[in-house]
Amino acid sequence: MAGIETTSTGHARRDYEWPSPLRSTGSVEDTGAIFHETLAALATPAPALRAVPAALGDVPTQGAQAAPTPARRLFPADRWQMRACVQACAGRDEAAVVYTSRAPVPDLTDVNDELMFATGYAFRPGTDDLIREGADGYLVGYGDTLHLCLDVIERLLADGISIGLVGKPTLDAPDPAMLARLARAPAVLLIETLADPLGIGPRLEAWLDELGFGGAYARLALPADRDGLPQAPTAGHILGALRRLLPARSGAHTARALTREELRDRAVRCIAVDDSAAGLEEVDLPAPKVIGTLDHRLAAKLGPYRFQTPFAAELRDVRLLGPHAVGFTADGRPILETAANRIDVLGRSLDRTPPERFDAPATAHLDLALSLVDLWSPLYAHWLMEGLTRLQAWEAYAEATGERPALIIDADPPAWMRESLRLMGVDADACVQWRGGPVQVERLVIGTRRRERGRVSARALAWVRERLLPNLDPAPSPGPRRIFITRADSRFRQVRNEHELLAALAPLGFEWVRLSDLPWPEQVRLFRDVEAVVAAHGAGMTNLMFSTRRPLVVELFGQKVSHMNYTLGLGTGCDHRVLCCKPDGDDLWVDTERLQRLIEM
């Protein structure tokens, strides 16, 4: 492996810009202050542990306890990881030097917009963090560089390039599992902000060499400034260095993805879905009632939007493989529509596919099939909005050709998936359960997604509702209830003052409901007739698609702000209102007076 040293003229450091679409939290905190705050709050004495601003290299800070050398060197990425890092080090006997960022940084979030290092996270020295998965290469960074890397990843996604990101909070120890992942990547770019010999460039290159890494490797490190201090790269530096690496990538599974437009052109048969006589579907989402200013991420979805024409495309000689059944054409191009029509989802799916699967012989052959499997298909909300709605393409194909494709679904489907298929007239036991393949399909029918740019087709939801509701087993209607959906049984987005909230809602006629206590058909009946819903954002709110009353909805947001249920509610005519609440990590506190005012507006 030939190492490439990448240097460039330094620029003055900029403050981190917020909001970035890849960061869902507005909190910007100084990790140095969090270090001292956490250390002071510890009940037990910490071992030799000191904080060092990254700009000062390995120079002790005033008032910090000196650590003997050699000491473990750690560089957390945000306030949550810093807090977890200090707590973990306090319970160990070894000395540690903890680097702090040179400016306040935002909280890091995962691909689901949940805080990466809050709920359920435990810092383990020596363990690297998989921030994002990718198929075309990986960035490796530490500390504050990870925030800049996320901006770069977003820009490249717009160009159809899937880049992953690995955070290395422990600078002087290899993580064998993460190194094995990097060794399989077509390209690896290390982003350095610590001056030599404090950086990890030579170590990372040697570790990858030991594993037989054959891809392209580079290290981006800017020259010191006039004061001799290391400079942090900008997103532009990272983007330029990475683009110089990417032409060196190789491998059939990194071929350019087949887009929706190309799928239409290459299909041997393309059948329109939905009522084409009604013309293209358009939606004009109205502004919801709020107290204060509507979050910009929600405001961006308002106004008119025109959906693309949905269709069912028949493609010949397709190979399905990997845990999420990504489709490949005969000439080796991945089909983007089989990965939710998103390049980031495709990258994550390919990254999770064992390399040996790409050239392995087929484990089965199918003549005619339509797959409902992808990265998100096991998730409740995505299944309802993106799985059940594609059954319309399945039926359109059958009506046009007289042939009904075999349906491919996730292996060992949960009860709600089986029940939803049953109520749609599909026998789950007659479906092909996906086990990872590779599977060769002579004729694959691909139904286009009915959710575009965060907006789900109201026509598609209406089609599902009209097919499903008449098949509910006879039972008394629960009536037009007013409900609060608890998330007390969930890891994320619990309402911390739920008892206070319930006391405030009771005079307004609301009752407490835990959806996990209800069989799935009862959940559908409940939402079919519901009059009003208050809930923190979550998958259960997707049941609003079954509503026939256009209910009042108040969606509660903490640090995570998502437009999934919000656009569903507005698009189907619900009186969908929004209340932004005080975050508490991944959870939230509700101002009950503001909630009452919002309900009564």
Image (cartoon, rainbow, N blue to C red):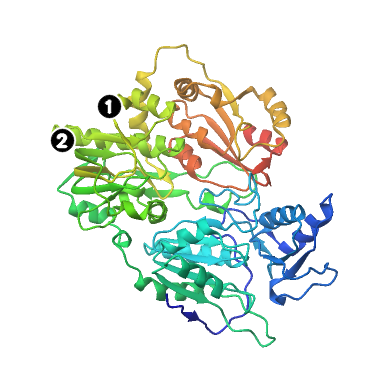
Q: Nearer the viewer, residue 512 or 141?
A: 141
Q: Position of residue 83 (x, y in %)?
A: 72, 54
What is the three-letter code of the residue carrying label 1?
Ala
The crowd level at tag 1 (other Cα within 10 Å; few <14, some 14-19, many 20+) is few
Q: From the image, tell me which residue sits under label 1.
A: 430
Q: Earlier in the sequence, mark 2 or mark 1?
A: 2
Disc marking residue 487:
none
Front label number (2 vs 1): 1
Q: Is residue 471 left or right of residue 189?
A: left
What is the three-letter code of the residue carrying label 2?
Ala
Q: CA distance from mark 2 to mark 1?
A: 22 Å
Q: Nearer the viewer, residue 543 or 178?
A: 178
- Is any atom of residue 21 visible in this view? no
Residue visible at 25% across and 55% down in the picture = 261
Q: Extreme front residue here?
A: 210
Occupied quadrant, residue 482:
top right
Q: Nearer the viewer, residue 507 or 502?
A: 502
Q: Extreme bottom residue here?
A: 226
Q: Position of residue 154 (x, y in %)?
A: 47, 62
Q: From the image, tell me which residue sits under label 2.
A: 400
Q: Position of residue 515 (x, y in %)?
A: 54, 26
Q: Position of residue 547 (x, y in %)?
A: 45, 27
Residue visible at 51% across and 56% down in the picture = 177
Q: Is residue 310 left or right of residue 116?
A: left
> Element type at marker 1?
helix
> Element type at marker 2?
helix
**Number of callouts:** 2
The answer to whether residue 342 is above or below residue 588 is below
The crowd level at tag 2 (other Cα within 10 Å; few <14, some 14-19, many 20+) is few
